[in-house]
Amino acid sequence: SAVISQKPSRDICQRGTSLTIQCQVDSQVTMMFWYRQQPGQSLTLIATANQGSEATYESGFVIDKFPISRPNLTFSTLTVSNMSPEDSSIYLCSVGGRVAGNQETQYFGPGTRLLVL
Amino acid sequence: QQQVKQSPQSLIVQKGGISIINCAYENTAFDYFPWYQQFPGKGPALLIAIRPDVSEKKEGRFTISFNKSAKQFSLHIMDSQPGDSATYFCAASMKGTGNQFYFGTGTSLTVIP
């Protein structure tokens, strides 16, 4: 399985500011995903980020609010722009991988805990 | 629309008991069903997974039971331990969707000594 790190691990931000979250993987991966997990809730996919192409956003998420970069096969960033308290959440990076039988799966990073005041 | 429905929302089990978490799906195109375990302050970790061509998969104390006709699958934790206390998510995916996963709503498991 891939080893995934995220920076920062947590942050407290003021409303109206922006925060960029970094995701680093120890191996080259084609597919990377960004999720949001609100307290006590399930995981909601924000976007899929494949190297060499524009990120694909899910319904309810837009590029202006959550711009994503994917400069190479081991790194991606998610920016949460013009933050409001409603953006307080855990942001998770995941990567696509393969398990037995060539089955595609996903591995998650430790998450970034964001509190917006 | 919730693609994968998970129950119960929370579960309390005595140490040594069996924990059972259930998930149901509608889309018969799903062909991969993983379970994730998430401890507080951590990201979800892949625990065990199954494909619909088998009815059961066991890894240590963790077993997935899969009922294709009922479109249901469940996670059984045998001899539950306090260290198993975590939130468990089921998920489903299908080929051709760019590896998109559909997650259940999660089950908070507490194993009391």
Image (cartoon, helix red, strand yellow):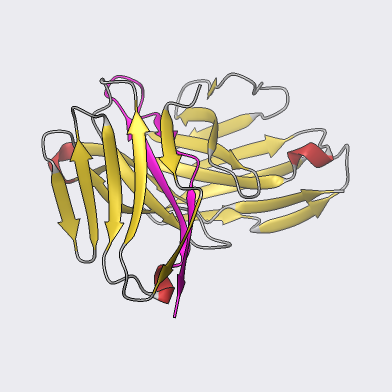
**Residue B91 on image: x %, y %:** 37, 38
B56 lies above or below B18: above
Where on the picture, by quarter, is residue B52?
A: top left
Query: Farthest bottom residue?
Result: B113
B94 lies above or below A36: above
- Name the quadrant of the C terminus of chain B: bottom left
Whether residue B91 appears in magenta in the rendering, the answer is: yes
**Residue B99 on image: x %, y %:** 35, 29
Residue A29 visible to an observer of this rendering = no
The front one of B71 and A96 is B71
Q: Where does the magenta region start and end?
A: B85-113
Point 19% across, 30% down: residue: B68
Whether residue B92 appears in magenta in the rendering, the answer is: yes
Where on the picture, by quarter, is residue B104?
A: top left
Point 54% across, 28% down: residue: A47
**Residue B88 on image: x %, y %:** 43, 53
Where on the picture, by quarter, is residue A91?
A: top right
The front one of B57 and A93 is B57
**Residue B29 on image: x %, y %:** 26, 20
